[in-house]
Image (cartoon, grey):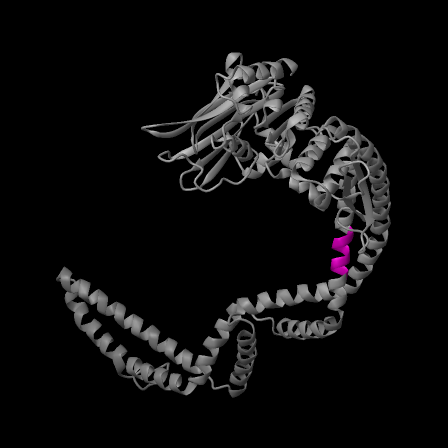
Amino acid sequence: MLRELRIENLLLIERAELRFGPGLNAITGETGAGKTILAHSIDLLSGGNARDGIVRPGASEAYVEGAFAMPQGFFEDGGDELAEIAARIPESADGLVLARRVSAAGRTSAFVAGRSASARDLRLLAGRLLGFYGQHEHRRLTLASAQMEILDGFGGAQQIALRSRYRQAQLRVGAIERELAELREREGARERDLDLMRFEFSEIEAAAPEQEEVEGLETERSRLQAVEFLREAASRGAVALAGGGDAAVEEGGARAALDEADAALRGGADRDAELATIAGRVAALAIEAGEAARDLRGYLDRLEADPGRLMVVEERLDVIDRLKRKHGGSVESVLAYGERCREQIERLVGTEERSLGLESELSATTPDRDRIGVELSAARAAAARRLETAVGAELGKLAMDGARLEVELNDNPAGWGPNGRESVELRVATNPGMPLAPLRDAASGGELSRLMLALCSLGGGGTRTFVFDEIDAGIGGTTATAVGERLRALGRDGQVICITHLAQVAAQADRNFTIAKRADAGGARTTVDRVEGEALVAEITRMLGAAAGDAAAGAHARDLLAAG
């Protein structure tokens, strides 16, 4: 049940607070006063889209908040998404508060129990808390999808659960069929792809390139290609350091000069500390020059021209370079491509096995889908007959004596569909003796409104709050009285909020609210107030089209209220 509705800065409404109660709550007011604003506020709480320019001029944002009493077991059997929302609501919460903010720039935010939420969360919750029927909602009755929802909802929780099981089974069958079709379509290209993947993988596997190896080979190739130049450089360096003698008897060169300098300085080193420091450095240079000369001679002994090794190195680098050019330009990209090839080979090799597995799974799943579908068809057929009888009785209470509803179940030409193997079409004869015809052809707007009310009365699907925005449009007289009586009867087991322009409906209400627009220097403002007593008599009189002082109309208004 919707206990309270608070609105701030929504179009003409600067601030309003409505406290609803059980039974029938009627909202009335002059045309253009802003009754549709109230309907839009409830639509916002239900996760609907915010209309352009909905924020009151001069305000930074609009705000709508609804405080609901939660039915017993509200979150049970609601699925994982509803359970996730329930986990965010304090256990001590007395009811459930939904809220929506709309900024002047058009951005919206949603809240559940004071915590940030999404519009989808609001839709999930509001869908279980209330049924909202806008001014043109009765036109949905002409849609095949809506007609199937009506039939399954009337069939009750077991039929809805059966449809859910069917949908899951059908989704699984469809997924298997699509994967099988894809595998069969690719069968022709499978061998070609497999050959290519195997060839490229074998190339990479045989080469087995490594980045460290490539760096070492490039260094070795550079040395082998320049061996004569390196030999000449090393030889000249050795002669410059150690002279022209062999390694055992060194003659001349930098080493001999350094030895001579060392001998000359050694005699005076013990007489002056500064000279001793320099002499030490010269001695060290002499030792270093000797070691460098020996290292160069050793390098020359090891340095050999090896054309055969150079060819091996270049061939190896050519193989790796070719793979790098084909597969991304680096050793890492080559190895990554090889891994993808391996995975593709495993997948392609497993295609035949996968196809056999899918065919086996399809053989097991299809009969289960068919069995559930047959049960669903039988349940729908039984529910259709009960619905025809029940709607006929309800329409009689809504001043449509003799009107008949027929639920026609037609087999789908394509066989099993997402909702079963049949489509649903509601056919109606609005007067005795008239032939049955589809709703879109046979019923006027007023008749569709009453038919929708009859269906709501029969199959609310657990919904305890119904919101009707001018469901009584297009009707009047005794029919309006009948509609008011039915709305009041529907409210006995829960709550009905009805925006109406008919005095006969408003007079039946347990609570009445009137919406009025007033203009002053600050602009136009709409206010919403609860009316009772003489104020209610005056409002009913206005709805009858009479002036405030019309005694006859006032008496009629009192009679309507007394009868209600």
Q: Quadrant of residue 380?
A: top right
Q: Main secondary structure of the magenta part?
A: helix
Q: Quadrant of residue 308?
A: bottom right
Residue 418 visible to an observer of this rendering? yes
Q: Is residue 380 above or below residue 261?
A: above
Position of residue 353 measured from the top left corner of the image (x, y, whole percent): 80, 61
Q: Nearer the viewer, residue 50 or 87?
A: 50
Q: Is residue 410 left or right of residue 142?
A: right
Position of residue 193 measured from the top left corner of the image (x, y, whole percent): 69, 72
Q: Residue at x 63, y 65 (%)?
A: 340
Tally of marks: 0
Q: Is residue 259 above or below residue 53?
A: below
- Pick the quarter of the image with the N terminus: top right
Q: Which residues are magenta?
A: 173-180
Q: Is residue 325 above or below residue 361?
A: below
Q: Is residue 76 left or right of residue 64?
A: right
Q: Nearer the viewer, residue 540 or 327?
A: 540
Position of residue 62 measured from the top left corner of the image (x, y, whole percent): 43, 33
Q: Is residue 481 above or below residue 353?
A: above
Residue 1 visible to an observer of this rendering? no
- Pick the quarter of the image with the C terminus: top right
Q: Residue at x 73, y 40 (%)?
A: 149
Q: Nearer the viewer, residue 5 or 342?
A: 5
Q: Quadrant of residue 186?
A: bottom right
Position of residue 235 measured from the top left corner of the image (x, y, whole percent): 35, 84
**Residue 174 in magenta stretch:** yes
Q: Is residue 367 left or right of residue 75?
A: right
